[in-house]
Image: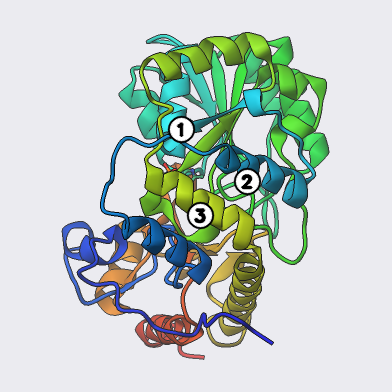
Amino acid sequence: MKRYDFDRVIDRHGSGSIKYDNLKATFGSEDLIPMWIADMDFAVCPEITETLKQRMSHPIYGYAAPAESYWTSILDWLDRRHDFKVGRQEITYIPGVVKGIGFAINFFSKPGDKVIIQPPVYHPFKIVTEGNDRVVLPNPLIKTETSYRMDLEGLERLARDEKPAMMILCNPHNPVGIQWDANTLREVARIARENNMIVVSDEIHGDLMLNGRPHIPFLAVSEDARAVGVMLGAPSKTFNIPGMVSSWCVIKNPELRDRFFHWLDTNEFNVPTFTATIATEAAYNNGEPWLNEALEYISDNIDFTRRYLAERLPVIDMVTPEASFLVWLDCRNLGLDQEQLVKLFVNRAHLALNDGSMFGDEGRGYMRLNVACPRSVLTTALDHLHDALAPAIKQ
Ligand SMILES: Cc1ncc(COP(=O)(O)O)c(C=O)c1O
């Protein structure tokens, strides 16, 4: 028996959501189905909402002290869900994963230093690096027939020859949905340690593993990884609460950790709001049944998309994600340049997807589709796409 209703269509217009209320500013039109920004169109689990309501009904919102049970909820979650043990002193709050990347770049490198990223990849990796006057060293993923793999030879060459201060790893990888296997992660860690490179591992999608696949935290794979790794995670993607701004950072190596955590502490970057801690604790302690159902629903949406494309739009291919709710659509067979492709989605199909090229030049010819929505919305969106393409692909 299902406990939660993921078919319910919730009108988010006017709720201050980027995904809905920034359509005009970003795409030039309101008349679009929003399938871009990576949050879900599903109601948050009632266990979180009820806890927040209860706290909000207390009439004083003063300075808050995070309860010890907040920390325990995160540590228990990582142990229970990912078989990954973290000590209380090894974790700190951070106000967002992208901010965490920014903190790490500012703290562990200096202007002019080089930072490896692996495009196509979540665009803030480049924006944060360059915006802080560091230099991006791209080590593009290698396209395989059905997915991608990491270019470990390229990584080793760049690490040895260019002496980067840091690498930003996306594990699992947005937008291509890969959970890197343990051997690949071990190689990354070895290369990093041999070349004095810190690895910031963004694991925000790690709880969203599909079809029972395990998430492999970077810090879990080897001593090398624990020596060089800065792990960033959050309940935000997992439980659809990114507006709560609640994330965490784990570092095992005390030499990196003590200095960095001290700097975060001195600047009070590690001070959570009370809504963040309360929502996090409720999510990790009581949200697991909701998450398991959400993942099944998402997995079915991915299967539905794959079948729909195969049967009705075979000109578009997709990478089947191992994690999360983002589907990387390969539209190269349409033979359009990127501007024409984006125009087709926006003006003809009335869909707001992420333009693949925002994740790097390697994303040209691709679009990123967010399928964390009710099946009826996904069906309408794919029908729109089908109708927009019908004149071009008479079968
Ligand atoms: C890989 C990755 N990292 C970070 C974020 C954003 O995290 P935050 O909102 O905590 O900055 C996203 C959101 O889509 C993401 O996909």
Label 2 residue SS: helix
**Disc 1 to disc 2: CB gap under 8 Å:** no
Please name which of the two marks, 1 or 3, marks the residue nearer to the observer: 1
Label 3 residue SS: helix
In this view of the protein, which residue sits in the foreground, 223 or 346? 223
Q: Which residue is mark 2?
A: 73
Which percent across, then down, holds residue 158? 61, 19
**Inter-mark Cα distance, 3 to 2:** 17 Å
Q: Which residue is mark 3?
A: 237
Write down the quadrant of residue 98 in the picture: top left
**Inter-mark Cα distance, 1 to 3:** 15 Å
Identity, as a three-letter code, of the amino acid under mark 2: Ser
Ligand 1 has an atom within 8 Å of the beta carbon of the residue at disc 1: no
Which percent across, then down, holds residue 349? 32, 78
- The residue under the point 60% across, 69% down is 290
- The residue under the point 23% across, 61% down is 16
Earlier residue among tags 1 and 2: 2
**Inter-mark Cα distance, 1 to 2:** 16 Å
Q: Is residue 358 visible?
A: no
Earlier residue among tags 3 and 2: 2
Please name which of the two marks, 3 or 2, marks the residue nearer to the observer: 2
Which percent across, then down, holds residue 23? 23, 64
Please name which of the two marks, 1 or 2, marks the residue nearer to the observer: 2
Q: Which residue is mark 1?
A: 94
Identity, as a three-letter code, of the amino acid under mark 3: Lys
Crowding at mark 3 (Cα within 10 Å: few <14, some 14-19, many 20+): some
